Image: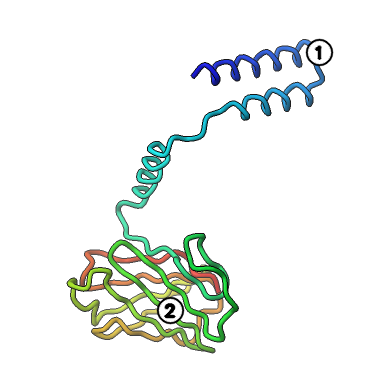
Amino acid sequence: MSNRRSADEELLAALKEVLTGRLPARQGILGALRAALSRTAPVPPDAAGAAKAIYTLRDIDSELADLTYDSAGRRVPAAAERGSVAAVRTVTLESPTTIIELGFTGRVVVGQIVPVDPGAGPPGPSDLDVQTMGGESARVPFDELGRFEIEPVPAETFRLHCRVAHVPGVVTTVWIPR
């Protein structure tokens, strides 16, 4: 804590020097900030873990399926190492209860909804809504195994709203880039 206090004091002293004209503004402020930042301690792992856990509660009322893999190269950091772009683009979206696999093949998106828990039972039959960023919406049925086709492929970024048997409410995906 003493490092933090002395860094704050140095920053205040530098600001006073700038305000009184004894030190050029750019040099004084940047130097004081540089010195203050060099003395800060790293964030404790427990604090970082707690912050991440709290952040996951931001959408507590809805279940969001995050993009975890995209063969077009738009990968999240935890995804596998980058490879060559496949002829068929595949996308994986995951929520705590549901995995949604998509395959872009020419003018059709083929997909399957799978429960994370194998004991949860089959996801359907039911339906999902395809919503584009422009506000267009289309309802698409899926079978008892969660298989579906979206034809044609949406012309712009879109997301899915799925009603599945093993999840109360709706699973909504993040926006999927075209």
Q: Position of residue 90 (x, y in %)?
A: 48, 78
Q: Position of residue 155 (x, y in %)?
A: 55, 79
Q: Which mark is residue 102?
A: 2
The residue that appears at 36% across and 50% down in the rendered structure is: 56
Quadrant housing the C terminus: bottom right
140 on left or right of 89? left
Instruction: Name the residue nearer the viewer: 92 or 62.
Output: 92
The residue that appears at 73% across and 25% down in the rendered structure is: 31
Label 1 element class: loop
Label 2 element class: strand
159 on left or right of 145? right
The residue that appears at 40% across and 86% down in the rendered structure is: 149
| Count of picture labels | 2
**Amino acid identity at mark 1:** Gly
Instruction: Name the residue nearer the viewer: 60 or 154.
Output: 60
Return the disc, 1 or 2, that comes first in the chain's sequence: 1
Which color scheme did the rendering employ for the protein?
Answer: rainbow
Q: Which mark is residue 176?
A: none
Marks 1 and 2: CB-CB under 8 Å? no
178 is higher (above) or lower (below) than 31 = below
24 on left or right of 72? right
Per the model, the C-alpha gap separating discs 1 and 2 is 62 Å
Q: Quadrant of residue 168?
A: bottom left
71 is higher (above) or lower (below) than 106 = above
**Mark 1 Cα-neighbour bin, 10 Å: few <14, some 14–19, many ≥20:** few
The residue that appears at 26% across and 79% down in the rendered structure is: 126
Q: Position of residue 94 (x, y in %)?
A: 37, 66
**Amino acid identity at mark 2:** Leu
**Mark 2 Cα-neighbour bin, 10 Å: few <14, some 14–19, many ≥20:** many
What residue does disc 1 label? Answer: 21
Q: Position of residue 120 (x, y in %)?
A: 19, 71
